[in-house]
Image: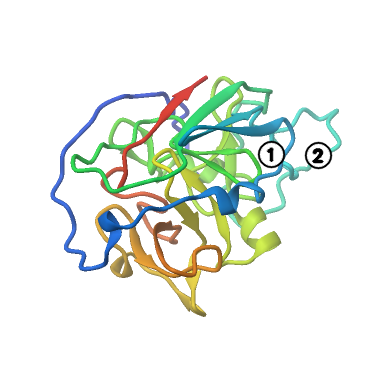
Amino acid sequence: MVAMILLNCSASDDEMETQDPVNEDPVGETDYDITVVLSMFSGTGLSYEVDGNTVIFTTQNLPDHTSPYWPVTNPLYEAYNGSNPSFQINPNTISTQNIVLSIPLNPAEASNKQATGLGPIGISRNGVVFFNQYAGPDQPLTNEINSFDQWLGHPQMTGQYHYHIEPTYLTQEFGEDAFLGVLADGFPVYGPVENGSTITNDDLDAYHGHFSATAEFPDGIYHYHITSEDPYINGNGYFGTPGNISQ
């Protein structure tokens, strides 16, 4: 059992420039529109509105599934019953948040790629935010992963529940190849399966995505995939230009 769990998961606005991946697909030449997936977002205390070329999500960030991190009086409280023998509950409790994400409705490749910060980097279709692959500044999830509940999420110190890795409640509900949400740059996030095959990191570029057709975007779109290995959701930063996140 791990003796210490890192819990900071704080925010950071650091940016970086990286080399663009070799990509012969017409990513930068296409006008994308993610309007088609907006109706797929549904969750407690989750709403959105479109303002010009921006979609503004407001979420209370409350998971629609069971967890040992709910207060014991909550109907969704459930003791840990997952498969990790090293599970160690952290001292935090899920609490209502007020997170606003202003995300491009028409995402496009950025000429200067920005690193994802600690804290929210996107939103899943049930209103829970995504975090990146770090427990703290350049600290891998090696220890913290043992505090993930049976649906592979957990709250940080202010009660902000989040997913660093595959949100198995969503992939169980909608399928391992399903649309799962969007990152702050507007590009969609999909599960670990595409066209019947499990996606690995080797199938993806430095930003943990690639260009291909999906059920929602049959003409193709750049999109991220969740995989079972680090960096899980996102790699060397956002492929597009991220919008604003306030909390």
| Picture layout, residue 35 above or below residue 194 | above
Secondary structure beneath label 1: loop
Residue furthest left as drawn? 19
Please state which amino acid type lies under the numbered disc 1.
Answer: Pro
Q: Position of residue 159 (x, y in %)?
A: 61, 24
Task: Specify the color scheme.
Answer: rainbow
Say left or right for 154 vs 15: right
Residue picked out by circle 2: 76
Please rate how many residues cluster around mark 1, counting C-alpha atoms within 10 Å: few if below 14, some from 14 to 19, many from 20. Answer: many
In the shown orientation, is residue 102 left or right of residue 79? Answer: left
x and y percentages locating residue 70 in the rendered image:
74, 32
Which residue carries the number 1 mark? Answer: 63
Q: Nearer the viewer, residue 10 or 212?
A: 212
Q: Is residue 88 in view?
A: no
- Nearer the observer: mark 1 or 2; the answer is 1
Distance, label 1 to label 2, CA atoms, is 9 Å
Which of the 4 quarters of the picture holds residue 208? bottom left
Choose top left, top right, bottom left or bottom right for residue 97: top right
**Looking at this view, is 122 or 10 the one in front?**
122
Task: Tell which of 125 and 90 is nearer to you.
Answer: 125
Would you identify the image quadrant in which residue 158 lies?
top right
**Mark 2 neighbour density, 10 Å: few (under 14) some (14–19) many (20 or more):** some
- Residue under the image location 58 percent in, 52 percent down: 37
The vertical placement of 3 against 235, above or below, is: above
Instruction: Label 2, secondary structure: give it.
Output: loop
Q: Residue at x 50, y 59 (%)?
A: 190
Q: For residue 27, which numbered disc appears in the image?
A: none
Contact flag, marks 1 and 2 (Cβ < 8 Å): yes
